[in-house]
Image: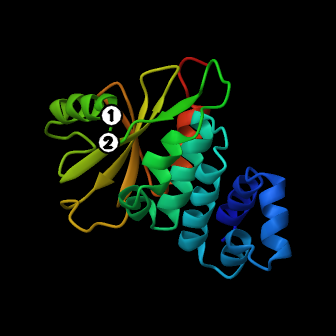
Amino acid sequence: MGRNSDLFYELAELVPEDRRRLDRANGEDVVTDMCGIGEGAFALEELCVRLVEHQVPLSEATRAQIAVLSESEASWERCKDWGKSRALLADCAGADEHDPPVRLVEDIEHGHALEDQIKAGIGLGHPLGGSDALAAWIACCRCDDVLVRVFDYERVNHVFADRYAIVRSLRHVTLFETGFEAIDALVEGCMAR
């Protein structure tokens, strides 16, 4: 799993130590056991359950990392539908951060407004022209850049995006193959840094 497993174990450390100790004592360390045997999607669902159960404060950047990790495991849509990654994690208190670098915007009013702006600016020759659907996913909180999930056909039973794009002003679009590449570029390439 490479980067996925490194990030996963880092996120698993957010679960309170007493819960992790109890899980290990009962032989039920489902979160890390499932990741260790390649069941990343199931492990992510269990991780989200534990984060919500213990009301672990999550920064906006951590929420975005969970989204990218679950997308890479082809479980973002399922986690959203199941309510563990987006809706219930939203119930976790926010970490005390005054200037979050990024924020999840998919399926909220701000995200829909961004999608409408982007779609209105797509014309002939635009890098996103010909895409059947796109979803504003993660927005930079310091500039107007937004990471979008791009679907080359309608999002019916679509597990994950075909590609990703960072839209910086409607005229400048950079395409990426993975969500990890895109989130790295979004954070590192922020125009307001």
Amino acid type at mark 2: Asp
Residue closer to the observer: 85 or 120: 85
Left or right of residue 63, residue 80 in this image:
left
**Residue shown at the point (50%, 23%) measured from the top left:** 141
Res. 27 image quadrant: bottom right
Residue 131 visible in the displayed image: no
Left or right of residue 19, residue 66 in this image:
left
Query: Looking at the picture, does residue 56 appear above or below residue 70?
Result: above
Amino acid type at mark 1: Gly
Cα gap from disc 1 to disc 2, whole angstroms: 6 Å
Which secondary structure, mark 1? Answer: helix
Mark 2, other Cα within 10 Å: few <14 / some 14–19 / many ≥20: some
**Residue shown at the point (85%, 64%) measured from the top left:** 21
Residue closer to the observer: 101 or 84: 84
Which mark, residue 111?
A: 1
Mark 1, other Cα within 10 Å: few <14 / some 14–19 / many ≥20: many
